[in-house]
Image (cartoon, coloured by chain):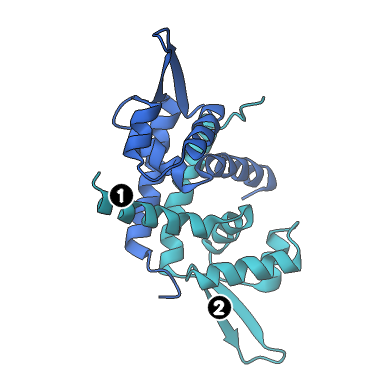
Chain colours: A blue, B cyan
Amino acid sequence: MNPSDKQKCLSAVNEALQVIGSKWAFLVISQLYYGPQRFNQLRRNLSTISIKSLTDILRHLEHYKIVNRQVYPTNPISVEYSLTEKGREYREVLFQMRQWGEKWGSTPNE
Amino acid sequence: MNPSDKQKCLSAVNEALQVIGSKWAFLVISQLYYGPQRFNQLRRNLSTISIKSLTDILRHLEHYKIVNRQVYPTNPISVEYSLTEKGREYREVLFQMRQWGEKWGSTPNE
């Protein structure tokens, strides 16, 4: 692999790594894969996540254009989150990770 | 996804995330995919990596059974690193990441 290919390859994988940052990123993406959800729906479905963590992870995923945020002019306003196309295609990365993890995943110190 | 499936799924993806920890993990795995290498070969091929970083990443990958370390009784002894089967199969995860990153990888603040 010549240096410039290596650099291109590295930044591509880096980009993918930036997205997954925390376990919640994976769970939020998996939730939204089944359709858009409002904040409180997500909170209920991700039962143990705090408001702050959910707010942070949604902002993180929005920043990386994985999630789209739609505000509806209801009273009070309601906000709906959905996966962008970029987000939907990230699921293939997660699927590969899950398959590999399930096959090889015995934690070394077990 | 019921709670126990979710937990199984999460720990599988977590396992995959533990491995990739740093950019060097990806580059070391990519290097060893083409065959076993000795420490100094790896250092030359990963030109900008420090001895400490390479030592740490090889120990990390060995701990997660991604890399196998073979000591030869030469004088001085020589040590050769190679991918385990678990390591070879991790490449599919990296390949998916790379594909996704190359397709969608424009850094948001560009």
Q: How many C-alpha atoms fall within 10 Å of the one at disc 1: few (<14), some, or many (≥20)? A: some
The residue at the point 45 percent across, 72 percent down is: A108
Instruction: Give how far across and how far down residue B68 sits, in percent.
Output: 51, 75
Quarter that holds the N terminus of chain B:
top left
**Residue A14 occupies quadrant:** top right
Image position of B56 (left or right of A78): right
Name the chain letter of the residue that bears numbered label 2: B
Kindly state the secondary structure of the residue where label 2 is placed. strand
The residue at the point 71 percent across, 92 percent down is: B75
Q: How many C-alpha atoms fall within 10 Å of the one at disc 2: few (<14), some, or many (≥20)? A: some
Residue A4 vs residue A14, the one in the foreground: A14
- Position above or below: B78 against B63: below
Name the chain letter of the residue that bears numbered label 1: B
Residue B57 vs residue A28, the one in the foreground: A28
- Position above or below: B87 against B8: below
Residue holding disc 1? B6
Image position of A32 (left or right of B35): left
**Do callouts 2 and 1 mark residues in contact (Cβ within 8 Å)?**
no
The residue at the point 46 percent across, 64 percent down is: B87
* Cα distance in 3D space between marks 2 and 1: 35 Å
Would residue B99 be visible to someone looking at this image? yes
Q: Are marks 2 and 1 on the same chain?
A: yes
Image position of A70 (left or right of A41): right
Residue holding disc 2? B69
The residue at the point 63 percent across, 81 percent down is: B79
